[in-house]
Amino acid sequence: MLTSSLRRVPRGVVVLGFVSLLMDASSELVHALLPLFMVSTLGASMLAVGIVEGLAEATALVVRVFSGYLSDRTRRRKPLVLAGYGLGALSKLAFPFATSLGLVVAARVVDRVGKGIRGAPRDALIADLTPADVRGASFGLRQALDTIGAVAGPLLAVAALAWFANDIRSAFWVAVIPAALCVALIVVGVREPERGTAGVGERRPPLSLRDVRRLDRRFVFVTIVAAVLTLARFSEAFLVLRATDVGMPLAQAPWVMVAMTVVYAAVAFPAGVLADRGHSPRLIGAGFAALIASDLVLAHANGAAAVLAGAALWGLHMALTQGLLSALVAAVAPADLRGTAFGVFNLASGVAVLAASALAGWLWDVAGPRYTFYAGAAFALLAWLALRARRQALPAIAG
């Protein structure tokens, strides 16, 4: 079943999956080292680190909507995808030369602007390229390859630090290589489908804002499900913090992220294949259950093994929901509005994760880590009960 579905995934989708893998490896290598570089080399405070990350992510959220709409209005996806990944690659050149916090801020903002530009058009392009009966498999495969890159990045960071004797500037140069390969792969390996195959006529007037009204209540429902689910799932940074909280050495804490991403990468594609066969409601329900179980395990963790188990359940939850929700957006959005739909969808999810992370941090400070994860489990349970009450409203992947 898996092999058959994999063979039917379009070549362009596979290429875009490897593009995601390469860029994620590059970005995660930088992200693994940047906080240490900012504090130890540039003398930045923890507040400054938080402001830099918050500014970068907020910028990406705003750009996502506009890039998705622009890809619909111009009826071209690849130029925006290439521009977004190109900006991400260019930003990697700044980090080895950074001698001030200002340059780091500029590079991070450029990197996140690039991510914002490429995200919605890339997902819309995948939807344009993919037959309806392998949507789940296509989005699941891209998510799996992206997650493999997320595993490779921190491992490359560890290897680069060992090779360059803890010289962070030299280690940053390693990130330039996969970023450059990623851009080259888009240029030579990705072709946009003919407009007709994407469901768009050869001669149609430019898209207007009034067309956005054609995103119907099914899209609104999927977006609300994703946003509520994200409110129950705060930033993965809290998994690492929980690891150090229970006594894991700082040098071993990144293995928590490796445990999460390995499970995520292994399950995402099979979950997409099952979604194509009509199991979307069961998969999303199982995703909620995995998140609740993860939160409870992490709340009661008293050692490294429990934190690793909780992180693995977190990865299972991500694998069962993230690619599936993207495939649902592709199923319910009109072909000529997919970029806009993914932009709005990503914005809603991004705002939700920022709010959830702020709440999680506040709970951690005032009540302790256990109650942070209790709150996550409670939100997930409430969201799951609400979803069950309106289960019939969940559209089919191949709708």
Image (cartoon, rainbow, N blue to C red):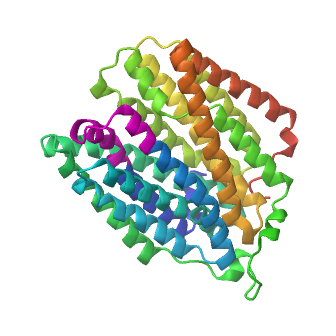
| Identity of the residue furthest to the bottom in this view | 203
Q: Is residue 380 placed above or below 188 in the rendered structure? A: above
Q: Is residue 66 magenta?
A: no
Q: Is residue 45 magenta?
A: yes
211 lies left or right of 291: right
Position above or below: 179 against 172? below
Residue 138 in view in this figure: no
Q: Nearer the viewer, residue 308 or 45?
A: 45
Magenta extent = 28-52
Task: Give above or below for 118 relative to 305.
Answer: below
Total label count?
Answer: 0
Q: Residue 287, located in which quarter of the rendered image?
A: top right
Residue at horizontal 35 percent and vertical 14 percent from the top: 247
Which is more toward the observer, 371 or 16? 371
Q: Magenta segment, principal secondary structure?
A: helix
Give me the residue at 43% from left, 76% from top. 187
Instruction: Please state which of residues 288 and 359 is positioned toward the viewer in this rendering.
Output: 359
Quarter of the image for residue 3 reads bottom right
294 vs 335, left or right, is: left
Q: Residue at x 69, y 43 (%)?
A: 226
Q: Is residue 23 left or right of residue 73?
A: left
Q: Is residue 229 left or right of residue 155?
A: right
Please state the horizontal and vertical placement of residue 118, each as a whole percent of the image.
53, 63
**Residue drawn 40% across and 34% down?**
47
**Quadrant position of residue 137:** bottom right
Task: Give residue 71's position: percent from left, percent from top.
Answer: 63, 72
Q: Quadrant of the C terminus?
A: bottom right
Res. 208 in view: yes
Task: Give above or below for 50 relative to 103.
Answer: above
Q: What x and y, as percent, mark residue 329? A: 71, 55
